[in-house]
Image (cartoon, helix red, strand yellow):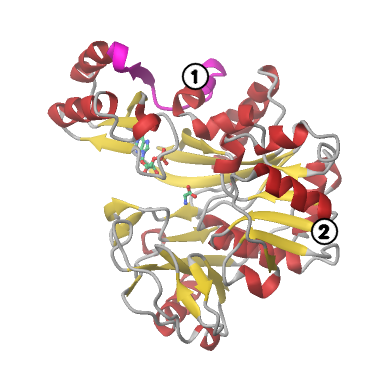
């Protein structure tokens, strides 16, 4: 099969690395890719908002399977664009239509969906500039802390947890009146704070059937001990020790099944990943958010634990035959540590040479923000630069290996959290 994978992060390197191991994989292209995907696939320099460019590439290269990594092309309607073309509509495509992608593209839509289908989530209400006054009154009466969320995509920055009413009110005004997050904060969801431990659950569905992938926990804050600003993710572990069979049974019956039934009831034909961000509140699962893709860096921990042939799995999703394949998990623990550019998630420099990548032999080294210069040197090219994944029988061993790898690889202003996974041991 000729495969096109869209995206350029650590997630895509992990997916491409796994796809490449499949006997079904013929030509593998990653668009636009990074220096890591270039080792296992052919990078294609076409921007992800250039839908007609993508379409021409797919036709010219006889692509048999399209897999979308990030949410943005989905929210912008790439699948719908393919559905309009006779030449493209029958090519298996893993990723939902614009309607389905609203689960991530609009927090207001997602909350409405959950409330309507009685899926456990924090109580909430949505306000706009027109209803700002009511919003301020709502905040005034709300218990603390209170969570304010920009409705649209805001690169992980659109969530503010306010611990006092004055901050909550001024934040609401800034978001609605001053458009703090641009168009994304034209609507603001105000919701109840959920106190618990977070985890990520990944579902792959073909619209009829589904499989649950290994669970993972992400470390979002930049600082050790979960302090400082939110990032895309500084590390991950899989599986999540507290997500035992009893808890996962609840997740399946109270969260996953009603979500898929809700999509069907609302006539949203969904093929792709659903990433469910959950809070475990005293043993009960509540949804914090839906994403319409795999998580990053969770993918770098989850995919190495997948024994199933990834190409076969995704092709079955694309052809609505997921019932004909099973998922096998590696029993070992995976831990992922992300090396970032100093300064991230605020300002940071790019273009530093990355050294000693080849010296890490016992862990997997996935590239995130990297590029290659004409002299074939690998350079830093983003906030999150490298994700190192170690597999071992215990979390302790896996962390020791991943930490050793994190120490070995060098680039100027390298930073990483040394406490990934420690809260779970
Ligand atoms: P999101 O962009 O929805 O993933 O939110 C970013 C982070 O904010 C989440 O990963 C949680 O840590 C936190 N968060 C979001 N909603 C809530 C909530 N209702 N209660 C507690 N924490 C939340
Ligand atoms: N690691 C969280 C995310 O991918 O959104």
Disc 1 element: helix
Name which residue lies at 32% across and 61% down: 344
> Can you say which quadrant of the picture contains the N terminus?
bottom right
Q: Is residue 190 above or below residue 222?
A: above
Residue 123 lies in the magenta stretch: yes
Location of mark 2 (residue): 2
Disc 2 element: loop
Q: Is residue 417 left or right of residue 4?
A: left
Q: Nearer the viewer, mark 2 or mark 1?
A: 2
* Residue 63 can be seen in this image: no
> Can you say which quadrant of the picture contains the C terminus?
bottom left
Give how far across and how far down residue 123 sits, in percent.
38, 22
Residue 112, label in figure: 1
Front residue of 81/255: it is 81
Give how far across and how far down residue 365 sits, in percent.
55, 74
Check whether the beta carbons of the residues at disc 2 and disc 1 lie within 8 A of each other. Answer: no
Give how far across and how far down residue 235 sits, in percent.
44, 62
Front residue of 233/197: it is 233
Q: Is residue 327 left or right of residue 353?
A: right
Residue 412, label in figure: none
| Disc 1 crowd, CA 10 A, few/some/many (<14, 14-19, 20+) | some
Which stretch appears magenta?
A: 113-131
Marks 2/1: CA distance?
39 Å
Residue 363 lies in the magenta stretch: no
Give how far across and how far down residue 45 sits, in percent.
63, 60
Q: Is residue 99 left or right of residue 336?
A: right
């Amino acid at each position: 099969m000729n495969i096109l994978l869209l995206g350029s992060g650590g997630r895509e390197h992990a997916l491409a690395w796994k796809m490449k191991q499949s006997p079904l994989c013929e030509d593998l292209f990653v668009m636009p890719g990074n220096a890591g995907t270039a080792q296992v696939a052919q990078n294609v320099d076409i921007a992800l908002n250039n839908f007609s460019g993508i379409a021409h590439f797919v036709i010219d290269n006889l692509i048999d399977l399209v897999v979308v990594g990030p949410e943005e092309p989905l929210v912008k309607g790439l699948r719908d664009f393919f559905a309009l073309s006779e030449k493209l509509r029958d090519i298996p495509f893993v990723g939902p239509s614009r309607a389905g992608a609203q689960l991530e593209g609009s927090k207001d839509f997602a909350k409405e969906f959950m409330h309507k289908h009685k899926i456990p989530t924090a109580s909430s209400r949505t306000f706009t500039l027109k209803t700002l006054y009511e919003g301020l009154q709502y905040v005034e009466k709300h218990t603390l802390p209170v969570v304010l969320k920009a409705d649209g995509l805001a690169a992980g920055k659109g969530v503010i947890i306010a611990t006092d009413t004055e901050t909550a009110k001024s934040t609401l005004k800034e978001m609605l009146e001053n458009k703090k997050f641009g168009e994304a904060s034209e609507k603001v969801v105000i919701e109840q704070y959920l106190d618990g431990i977070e985890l990520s659950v990944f579902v792959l569905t073909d619209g009829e059937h589904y499989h649950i992938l290994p669970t993972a926990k992400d470390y979002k804050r930049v600082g050790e001990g979960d302090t400082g600003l939110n990032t895309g993710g500084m590390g991950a572990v899989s599986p999540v020790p507290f997500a035992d069979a009893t808890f996962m049974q609840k997740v399946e019956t109270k969260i996953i099944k009603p979500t898929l039934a809700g999509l069907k009831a609302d006539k949203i034909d969904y093929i792709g990943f659903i990433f469910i961000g959950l809070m475990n509140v005293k043993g009960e699962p509540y949804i914090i958010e839906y994403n319409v893709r795999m998580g990053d860096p969770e993918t770098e921990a989850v995919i190495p634990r997948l024994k199933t042939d990834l190409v076969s799995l995704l092709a079955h999703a694309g052809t609505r035959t997921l019932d004909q394949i099973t998922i096998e998990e590696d029993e070992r623990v995976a831990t992922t540590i992300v090396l970032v550019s100093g300064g991230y998630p605020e300002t940071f420099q790019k273009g530093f040479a990355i050294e000693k990548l080849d010296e890490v032999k016992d862990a997997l080294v996935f590239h995130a923000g990297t590029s290659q210069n004409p002299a074939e040197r690998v350079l830093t090219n983003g906030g999150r630069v490298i994700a190192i994944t170690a597999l071992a029988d215990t979390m302790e061993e896996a962390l020791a290996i991943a930490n050793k790898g994190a120490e070995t690889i060098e680039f100027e202003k390298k930073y990483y959290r040394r406490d990934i996974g420690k809260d779970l041991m």
